[in-house]
Amino acid sequence: MSKEIIVSGIRPTGNLHLGNYLGAVSNFVKMQYEHNCYFFIADYHSLTTHPNPADLHNNVKQVLVEYLACGLDPEACTLYIQSDLPQIPELYMMLNMHANLGELERVASFKEKARTQPNNINAGLLTYPVLMAADIIIHKATKVPVGKDQEQHLEMARTFGNRFNRVYQKEIFPEPYAFNYGQELVKIPGLQGGGKMSKSDGDGNVINLIDTPVIIRKKMSRAVTDTGPTEPNTQPSAAVQNLFDIMKLVSTADKLEHYKNLYANCAIRYGDFKKDLAEDMLNFLQPIREKIIDIQRNEMLLRKVAQIGKEKANESANKTIQECRQAIGFKSF
Ligand code: ADP
Ligand code: TRP
């Protein structure tokens, strides 16, 4: 298999949760040994919501710690903080000159934000897909591991890259495509019966990697179920199906089978089921949590990792930005 150039980032908005891990970061860990990977913490992107400086810094640090605890290896991949790359805002500015208001206004994520936060419809929000395109094409990425919700943004990254190539008559950027490791896309459901585990639905809906056993047990005991099956072999409700889906990921196949049989025979006791699931979940997360606590204290390691990532990512970004400057006609005298 030939090596792909892979880029992906996560906005630093708090602790990573099980959905982030199983849906994204665990795949990054596998990819890093097979491809040329750039993984970053998207702190420029988080400015759209105006975080205060201390929170921003803590969140960036926390994601860096958690990336490392999940197994990202700064020797194998390029792991960096987005704001350590001034080439990204430079490319973003160049791409913005060829991005049309109409096409940006039609982006689903912008329309959604404009509806949900009418008091903060800033230009950064409008041009979010341009910044994301710059993140991706600055390293000439061909594959981008992201969830389904990001597909429209990727399409725009292709549009902006192709447009730049066409306008300046240079084949600088290849087309980046969404990439799912393995076959199907994993969507980790939430605990409150909702579609996906997401921090925007509140802390009770997510299991964070850093959650203590006490917290995990408490959240699991409050996970939404239903009144129970009344007839044999019926389809579980969405909320109960969610818990089965989670169990499939953290428990043994035998255990899952055991509870499915109890359900099919109307003999399931949700209290026991959730307790058992909580224990498997905390055992699954225990090694990651221990590493988080360990790495959190290791300021020297974090400084070193950030520095190495910054140097490697700058090298790649510098090459591309020089090509863009040339293509545009910026030349030194
Ligand atoms: P959140 O919805 O909690 O704000 P983000 O949107 O910041 O999470 O997601 C960061 C990364 O984690 C993305 O690549 C996304 O696809 C992945 N991800 C988030 N939640 C899930 C989930 N429930 N299942 C699978 N992947 C997820
Ligand atoms: N928009 C992505 C999200 O919300 C985060 C992101 C920013 C990203 N830049 C990126 C993901 C570049 C992949 C590649 O999840």
Image: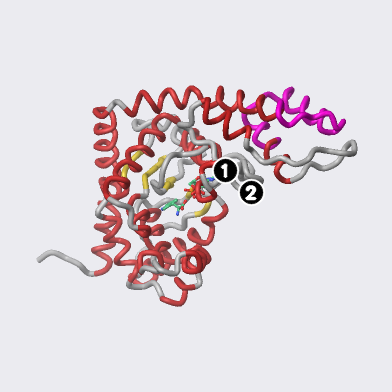
Which quarter of the rendered picture does the C terminus lie within? Answer: bottom left
Q: Is the residue marked by circle 1 packed among few (<14), some (14-19), or many (20+) residues within 10 Å? A: many
Is 258 drawn above or below residue 204 in the view shown?
A: above
Dot 2 alpha-carbon crowd within 10 angstroms: few under 14, some 14 to 19, many 20 or more? some
- In this view, the residue in front, 2 or 6, is 6
Please report the residue visible at 48 percent of the width from the left and 49 percent of the height from the top.
144
Q: Is residue 200 left or right of residue 298?
A: right
Q: Which residue, as the protein is rendered here, is positioned at the far left?
A: 333
Question: Could you tell me if residue 186 is visible in this image?
Answer: no
What colouring method underlies this structural image?
A: secondary structure
Instruction: Return the residue at label 1.
Output: 205
**Residue placed most toward the observer, 261 or 327:** 261
Q: Amino acid at mark 2?
A: Gly
**In this rendering, is residue 151 above or below 270?**
below
Which residue does the image show at 41% across and 43% down from the upper left?
14
- Name the quadrant containing residue 63: top left
Above-or-below relation of 64 to 86: above
- Residue 133 as seen in the image, left or right of residue 205: left
Does the stretch in magenta take in 223?
no
What's the CA distance linking mark 1 and mark 2?
8 Å
Q: Which mark is residue 277?
A: none
Disc 2 element: loop
Label 1 close to label 2 by CB (< 8 Å): yes
Horizontal and vertical percent position of residue 40? 37, 44
In the image, the segment drawn in magenta is 244-272
266 magenta-colored = yes
Is 121 located above or below residue 1 in the figure?
A: below
Along the line of sight, the residue nearer the viewer: 259 or 321:
259
Relative to 82, 15 lies left or right: right
Which residue is identified by label 2? 194
Q: Name the residue rendered at 87%, 39% in the picture.
A: 230
Q: Tell me the element at label 1.
A: helix
